[in-house]
Image (tube, helix red, strand yellow):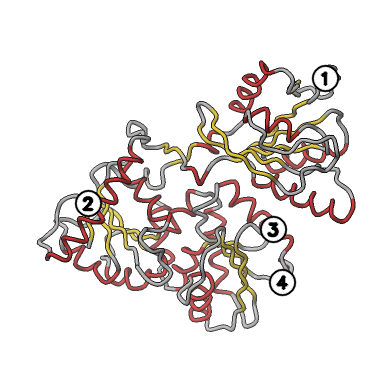
Amino acid sequence: MVGFGQGFGEVNVGHFYNFVCVSIFFRNFAVRTLVRSTPQNTDIVSKGNELKPRIGLFGRRNAGKSSLVNYLTGQSTAIVSDTPGTTTDPVRKSMEIGGIGPVVLVDTAGIDDQGDLGSQRVEKTIAALAEVDLALLLFTQWGEPEERIEHWCNQHGTPLLPIQTKADLSPQPRHDEALLMTVKDPSLRDTLIAHIRLKLPETAWRATSLLGDIVAAGDTVVLVTPIDSSAPEGRMILPQVQVLRDLMDLHAQALFCQPQELARTLASLRELPRLVVTDSQAFKSVAETVPDAVPLTSFSVVLARQKGLFDEYLRGTQTIGTLRDGDRVLLLESCTHNVTCEDIGRVKLPAALRRATGKDIQCDIIAGNTPLSAHRPPLADYRLVIQCGGCVITRQQVRARLLPALEAGLPVSNYGLALAWCTGIFHRATKIFKQ
């Protein structure tokens, strides 16, 4: 059992040694993170580096996208050439914008690329468009390709900043809202940065607290973290760290334990905790241990709520109860990791779905950033799509990932919510977020 705060009984030497080691780890973690915290405003927490907002550069070939990336970063980041189609796959470069923090610039292939290979490049460009928080549309002439991008952004609510490049050669405005730019004038860089600040939604670089509307300063929260073969060596998984950081920002007390230590952890407290958050795979045993009076949820459900689409997840999860023999379920994982015999997406969740429904369900999985449009069989063959917690991607990227399924009218769910349903505690795991 590892604890932060008061209310613990005596521990033996072995337990004390483990406690000291982990305490040193989290003390160092706290020193690095708390210096960036804003305790006076616990409703807002700055995003970490893994959640940098994306700013995409789009336009025809030779519209000056790569030149603008180099102009913004002050480095020779992207290859620049007069040869059309120099940029093939999207190129990503991090930079710092004052008042916002780190962002990722996404340089894309021309939207007017041609041929079989060009069509594949355009497809990747459109996929990048779906995941950015702000689209910079570069052009020297305005026509059908630009109108297509503008229409897409308007349809999907993506902020758009039209930029007329090479304005030194053609200063006549070709769009009412366009910013006239030339990379030959260094003084325009601050103007461009200022426009980006105005256009980039605050929700892209500042996120609401994970638990700020539920947990108050001084509250005790128990975090149940199983350690099995799928757990990384020597560290905790990102969702657990994100919840811990949030609790630190809220000035709450966090207690860590494994499932088999939960009963002893609860018994050591002077009063019941405000909340218990568990790894989804331990839902069943944890639910049997935690008193009904204590709210219970999972790390994945907490992240699902913050990432958006929570109402869609709540509705879509109930589709599990209607699955039939032979139905297909598509599982989406946003990261790439080593697969073990206890892998949640490839082993535990498919087994839980079959066990809970009593049906022969076929589960397929896509890991990484493979577009759903490129997946075979097609989406129409599936009854349900289940997304992981999305701890390593932004809110916009989660929405972009599920957009083809949502547009096709497919129900969507989340790993944590699906596992809660399969263990019969779906309503308990979501109750605290519905109040």
* Front position in the image: 189 or 406: 189
Residue 380 appears left or right of 206: right
Frontmost residue, 150 versus 64: 64
**Residue drawn at (67%, 70%) of the image:** 382
Question: Circle 4 sits in a helix, a strand or a loop, which is it?
Answer: helix
- The Cα–Cα distance between marks 2 and 1, rounded to whole angstroms, is 60 Å
* Amino acid at circle 4: Asp
- Name the side, left or right, on which 325 lies relative to 205: right
Which residue in the protein does label 2 denote? Answer: 4
- What amino acid is labelled 2 in the image? Phe
For residue 280, above or below residue 81:
below
Distance, label 2 to label 4, CA atoms, is: 48 Å
Between discs 3 and 4, the one toward the N terminus: 3
Label 1, on which residue?
Answer: 173
What residue is pinned by disc 3? 371
User: In the image, what residue occupies the spot 37% across and 35% down?
Assistant: 36
Question: Marks 3 and 2, how far apart in space?
Answer: 42 Å
- Mark pair 3, 4: CA separation: 16 Å
Q: Quadrant of residue 278?
A: bottom left
Residue sitting nearer the eye, 309 or 88 = 88
Crowding at dot 1, Cα within 10 Å, few <14 / some 14-19 / many 20+, comes out as some
* Type of amino acid under label 1: Pro
Q: Which residue is mark 4?
A: 381
Label 2 vs 1, first from the N-terminus: 2
